[in-house]
Amino acid sequence: MPSSSVPKLWTWPFIFLVLANLFTFMSFQMLLPNLPPYIESIGGSNVQIGLITTTFAFAAILIRPFIGHLLSTRPRKVLVLIGSIALLIMTALYPITQIVTVLLVIRFIHGIAWGWSTTVNGTAAVDLVPRRRVGEGMGYFGLSVTIGMIMAPSLGIYLYQNYTFDLLVWISVGLGIIAVALFSVTSFVTPKSVYENQKNPQKFSFFGSLIEKNSRYPALVTLLNTFGYGSVVTYIVIFGNEQGLSGTFLFYFFNAVLATVTRPITGRYFDRKGPWKLIMICSVISFAAMWVLSFASSNLHLIIAGALFGIGFGSMMPALQAWVISKTTTERSGIANGMYYSSIDLGIGSSALILGFIYQFVETATLFKLSSFLFIAVLILTFLDSRKQVEPWQSVQ
């Protein structure tokens, strides 16, 4: 195929959007692994530690159907800026109290802002990416998500362990300010169908805007995938403290490095071959990473586990998002994207709640072992779906 016929991916709006989304996720993810030990340090119970994640996830899932509906009738930029500014304000509120119940309320409102922002940002990316390069384009956009989910926690853990929780929050606020600035100078693309829908808006349906039926299967796989990740993000700092490991941040650092290095390869592979073999291979690697982590007794073990997790989980997340988007139409991409992020939040949130209960009876390392079998479930479901494919991947996009 001549290079002139390949639609351009790296436009300035797409570059600004990827960078802004990176700072958004870094601002948020710096706090995520440190909230459980922080809640524990101010007298929170095991159940409250789980609720700090579950409450957030519930709020994010609750708001996404409304955002999915708004995306069908509203221009992108206004919605993106509202979400980004709301995240910034809620992040700045964490240092005002050490009362756990008040923090839970803040966390709930923060979840609403997060659900809003992630849905509109992901949909804006879909609008900017050429449809023929959705796997590669969303792979690079997903890299901003993955690096945020992986690298920022390592920085956050380092700051929390060596300085104060308040300093951690204010650095997070600073990253959020950068995100707002970048979003402000980004030129967004709003599909023509949005302006047409403004003239004849569809009636809102909560469940109709919550679920895109064509994308339900990859969304279920995403939920199971992030349940496994939820055990890591909720308990790795506590596990590191129990094991006397000073380099917990190394797990996230090498996770980010390997996820970044492998992303160009996996994104192009997705566009050529589809999601199935890629996700199956990565699920096995993620399973192995969880077991290495569960037996970690040195920083070297954390590095190995982090590297494996970066290759496995880090490659699966953007592939899953591209899979979800590829199953629907442009008009429904906002709803499908919202369902994808709701699957992430539900996976992490349910993981925190269920494992928070189990944590009363088992060691932290056992939580990682139990969670690892969710990646086996991902492998099985993806394999079953691959057996149903009767046409080449390119023809079903």
Image (cartoon, grey):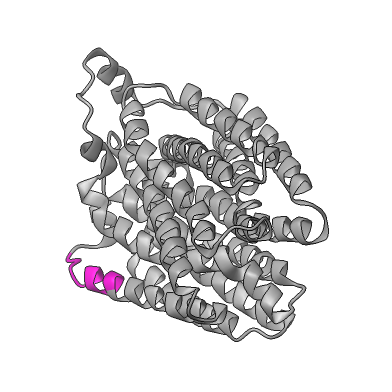
Q: Position of residue 155 (x, y in %)?
A: 73, 57
Predominant SS along the magenta part: helix
Q: Residue at x 70, y 73 (%)?
A: 241
- Counting labels gives 0
Note whether 370 is above or below 99 in the view shown. Answer: below
For residue 349, what is the image quadrant? bottom left
Note whether 162 is above or below 128 in the view shown. Answer: below
Q: Between residue 137 and residue 7, name the one nearer to us.
A: 137
Q: Residue at x 45, y 48 (%)?
A: 55
Note whether 171 is above or below 323 in the view shown. Answer: above
Q: Between residue 278 and residue 51, name the one nearer to us.
A: 51
Say if the magenta span includes residue 194.
no
> Is residue 263 visible to us here?
yes
Left or right: 310 as drawn, with respect to 196: right
Q: Position of residue 206 (x, y in %)?
A: 24, 35
Instruction: Provide the residue span drawn in magenta.
Output: 381-390
